[in-house]
Image (cartoon, rainbow, N blue to C red):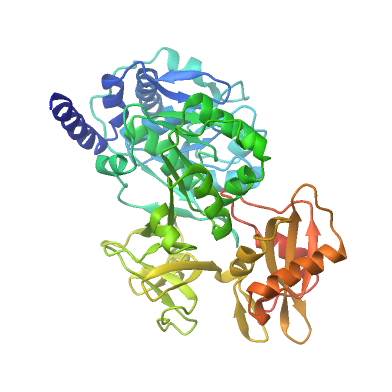
């Protein structure tokens, strides 16, 4: 009983602290010596160390003239400083924008200027750090992490003389992430009111005093940031960072660190499953209690195999940087509705609209629209035209397509920009990929529309083979015959090309535009 009362008291303190961004301070007091973050190189920082540096960073930013509401940009890989800066912006009232460090100098500079960053924390190994910062005249403070950058202050040296005690006047900070920018420049997704996750949510996901969170994706991306970084910070779990994906190393880390929670994307599932059986059997994964995935549609065959391996510990979400109704489905429910991302939420609605703006009946695919929360939810920063273009009344779309079945479960079919229009008929490539991936030789698939003089577009499968299989006309015909057994005739690819790799974003989404581009070179795509 005493333990229950103590936990209730801790939860109340955490709920109160979350409103001013001071959750890490509570954990630092409750479990000062527990590892808060473990870097890819094994360096460990305790909760008390992270908390002290967070306070120092607030003071550093204030000394540079920043005040609550000002923007702070972060350009770095998965490492402990990222957590310290995140904790600082949360309590200092600053608006943080993590930037994809794989972008070009021009793209990084654009985001720095567009988000109106007044401070930049950048990693020395990122070559674009200095030239991008040079193109951002609004920066008052530039701090280098992991080495020297010309014109930047060194992170450790800048913090060394500052007071690490808790600041006396915390205020809740915000974040603004940028869309992937598949068409035109990326846009900041701005919400006037910061989101705060209740402690009850962590309890529902099974977090406890022994939880260990693995972050295998890039921390700058919305999903790993929410489900790995911010979740570990809120739940008081140890966060284990991986710097790049390696399937066997991931299993080794799960075993050695006794990982309990993680966010993955479907391509990571596929790469884990592709390991030889003897390698998979070598590692103990029994510590895993909760895997959440999303960001890209998951072929049902792949998810079935993951549940069979890890057990019914896999949950799926469907949402975006813009927010949305927040669909969620656990393993047991998914096994009853394979391929679904969850049932229509009751709190905020969603609907499927056709090209004329009419609501689609069950089992008919259209564009997915999500209801905005009271107050309007998000805006695209400094782009009212794009904001309004995404909306129909008090609903908005992220460009995804799907349908509700008769029971109100949502199934994704792709994105509107990816739809193949052949002879006036809409064809959704994700549905085709979900079947092709079931063939024993197929490692990955990206179905696209290619030019056709009569039909406008024709369906083509672009296939990456598993190790041990060689491209041949015979294998191509075998895969196409396999597709004919499970797909309606108009969806069956008319041709097939083999490739050695397929482009995917850092979030794991197939980049169909890059796959499709060579086929349309010199021609305007007909939409």
Residue that appears at 54% across and 20% down: 42
Residue 123 percent across, percent down from the top left:
58, 29
Left or right of residue 14, residue 404 in this image: right
Position above or below: 430 against 118: below
Residue 295 percent across, percent down from the top left:
51, 54
Position above or below: 459 against 468: below
The picture quadrant where one finds residue 518 is: bottom right
State the residue in front, 439 or 418: 439
Left or right of residue 462, residue 80 in this image: left
Q: Is residue 23 visible?
A: yes
Q: Is residue 329 visible?
A: no
Residue 506 percent across, percent down from the top left:
59, 47
State the residue in front, 58 or 371: 371
Residue extending furthest toward the right: 473
Residue 148 percent across, percent down from the top left:
61, 21
Position above or below: 168 against 484: above
Residue extending furthest toward the top: 161
The picture quadrant where one finds residue 109 is: top right
Residue that appears at 44% across and 32% down: 287
Residue that appears at 62% across and 27% down: 124
State the residue in front, 287 or 55: 287
Q: Quadrant of the N terminus?
A: top left
Q: Quadrant of the C terminus?
A: bottom right
């Amino acid at each position: 009983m005493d333990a229950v009362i103590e936990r209730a008291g801790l939860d109340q303190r955490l709920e109160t602290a979350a409103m001013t961004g001071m959750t890490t301070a509570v954990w630092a007091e409750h479990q000062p010596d527990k590892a808060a973050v473990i870097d890819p190189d094994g360096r460990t920082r305790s909760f008390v160390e992270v908390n002290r540096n967070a306070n120092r960073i607030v003071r550093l930013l204030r000394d540079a003239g920043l005040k609550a509401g000002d923007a702070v940009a972060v350009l770095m890989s998965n490492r402990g400083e990222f957590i310290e800066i995140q904790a600082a912006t949360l309590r200092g009232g600053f608006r943080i924008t993590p930037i994809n460090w794989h972008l070009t100098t021009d793209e990084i500079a654009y985001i720095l200027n567009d988000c109106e960053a007044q401070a930049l924390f950048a990693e020395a190994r990122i070559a674009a750090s200095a030239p991008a910062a040079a193109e951002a005249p609004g920066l008052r403070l530039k701090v280098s992490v992991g080495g020297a950058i010309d014109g930047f202050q060194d992170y450790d040296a800048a913090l060394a003389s500052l007071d690490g005690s808790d600041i006396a006047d915390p205020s809740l900070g915000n974040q603004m992430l940028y869309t992937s920018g598949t068409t035109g420049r990326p846009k900041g997704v701005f919400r006037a009111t910061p989101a705060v996750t209740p402690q009850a949510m962590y309890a529902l996901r099974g977090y406890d005093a022994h939880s260990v969170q693995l972050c295998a994706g890039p921390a700058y991306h919305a999903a790993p940031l929410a489900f790995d970084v911010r979740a570990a910070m809120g739940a008081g779990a140890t966060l284990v960072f991986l710097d790049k994906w390696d399937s066997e190393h991931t299993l080794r880390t799960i075993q050695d660190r006794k990982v309990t929670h993680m966010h993955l994307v479907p391509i990571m599932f596929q790469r884990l499953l592709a390991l030889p059986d003897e390698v998979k059997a070598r590692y103990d994964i029994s510590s895993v209690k909760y895997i959440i995935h999303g960001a890209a549609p998951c072929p049902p065959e792949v998810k079935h195999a993951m549940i069979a391996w890890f057990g019914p510990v896999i949950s799926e979400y469907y949402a975006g940087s813009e927010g949305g109704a927040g669909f969620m489905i656990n393993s047991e429910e998914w096994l009853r509705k394979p391929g679904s991302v969850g049932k229509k939420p009751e709190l905020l609605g969603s609907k499927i609209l056709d090209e004329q703006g009419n609501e689609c009946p069950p089992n008919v695919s259209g564009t997915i629209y999500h209801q905005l929360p009271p107050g309007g939810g998000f805006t695209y920063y400094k782009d009212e035209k794009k904001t309004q273009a995404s909306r129909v009344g008090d609903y908005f779309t992220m460009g995804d397509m799907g349908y509700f079945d008769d029971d109100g479960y949502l199934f994704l079919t792709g994105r509107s920009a990816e739809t193949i229009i052949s002879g006036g008929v809409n064809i959704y490539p994700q549905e085709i990929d979900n079947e092709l991936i079931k063939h024993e030789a197929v490692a990955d698939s990206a179905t696209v529309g290619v030019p056709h003089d009569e039909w406008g577009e024709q369906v083509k499968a672009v296939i990456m083979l598993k190790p041990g299989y060689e491209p041949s006309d015979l294998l191509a015909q075998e895969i196409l015959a396999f597709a004919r057994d499970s797909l309606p005739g108009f969806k069956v690819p008319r041709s097939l090309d083999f490739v050695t790799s397929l482009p995917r974003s850092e979030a794991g989404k197939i980049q169909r535009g890059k796959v499709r581009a060579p086929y349309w070179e010199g021609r305007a795509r007909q939409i």
